[in-house]
Amino acid sequence: MSDDGERRASALEERLDVPMALLAVVWGALVAYELVAPARQRDALALVGNVIWVVFILEFVLKLALSGNPLRFLRRRWPSVLFLALPVLRMLRLFRALRALRALPVARVVGSGYRTIGSARSLLGGRLAYLAVVTLTVVFAGGQVLFLVQPGAPSLGDALWWSANLGITGNYTFEPTSVPARLVSLVLSTYAVVVFASLAATVGAFFVESRVEAEAEAATTGP
């Protein structure tokens, strides 16, 4: 990748970071609402979703063109390619069976979460702020997936409550009965352990750094 290509790609990403992050949040909310939306609203929601999808594709193509090394760019961004292809699969009759199994809705939920986390990574510099956004996104996406794969889930709100308890505290407030729901619950409870360990490490590093700075200041000022 040439220096000019790097500068152009960096400048484009800086300009698009904020609007694309906001669009990712809108997309995530739209995907969630589609799960419970009345039938009469689904055509309009599908239209809005397709427009957002086209915007994401245009952004991806621009970054690909400016990357200077398309193959390396595609290797690093292959999840984005996969999630951008989902709306095409949604339109093909060949994938009606997948829709019946709710595989594509689950993939769309995961795709919107992946997009939101990617936007947060480029915008947030602080570790705690980034961890908070990632946790919120994981809980939100996890609740949607549980709503899709757990038989007899009473409501999306209940599924989000289950996900919040699993993803933040690791506590099971319900008993998952399907294999997909059990897998999602296991992932969320594992994530809670990882988050606790990350927070403990961050707080510990803060106190150690503060102590080192205090000792250095004391040594500088002298008795």
Image (tube, rainbow, N blue to C red):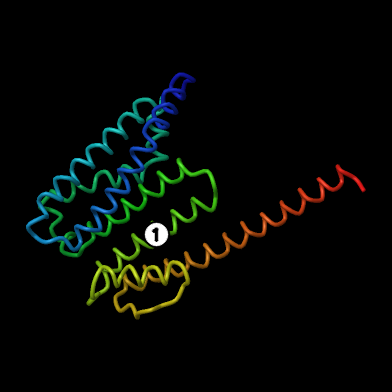
Q: Residue at x 29, y 63 (%)?
A: 144
Q: Specify the quadrant of the image occupied by residue 158.
A: bottom left
Q: Does residue 16 lie above or below 104 as drawn?
A: above
Residue 188 position in % (x across, y down): 42, 67
Q: Does residue 115 lie above or below 179 as drawn?
A: above
Q: How many marks?
A: 1
Q: Residue at x 27, y 54 (%)?
A: 29
Disc 1 target residue: 138
The kind of secondary structure element at disc 1 is: helix
Q: Nearer the viewer, residue 102 or 154?
A: 154
Residue 115 position in % (x across, y down): 35, 47
Amino acid at the residue labelled 1: Val
Q: Which residue is drawn at 39% across and 68% down?
A: 164
Q: Single out the residue that lies furthest toward the left.
A: 40
Q: Residue at x 33, y 67 (%)?
A: 160
Q: In this view, does 218 lie to the left or right of 41?
A: right
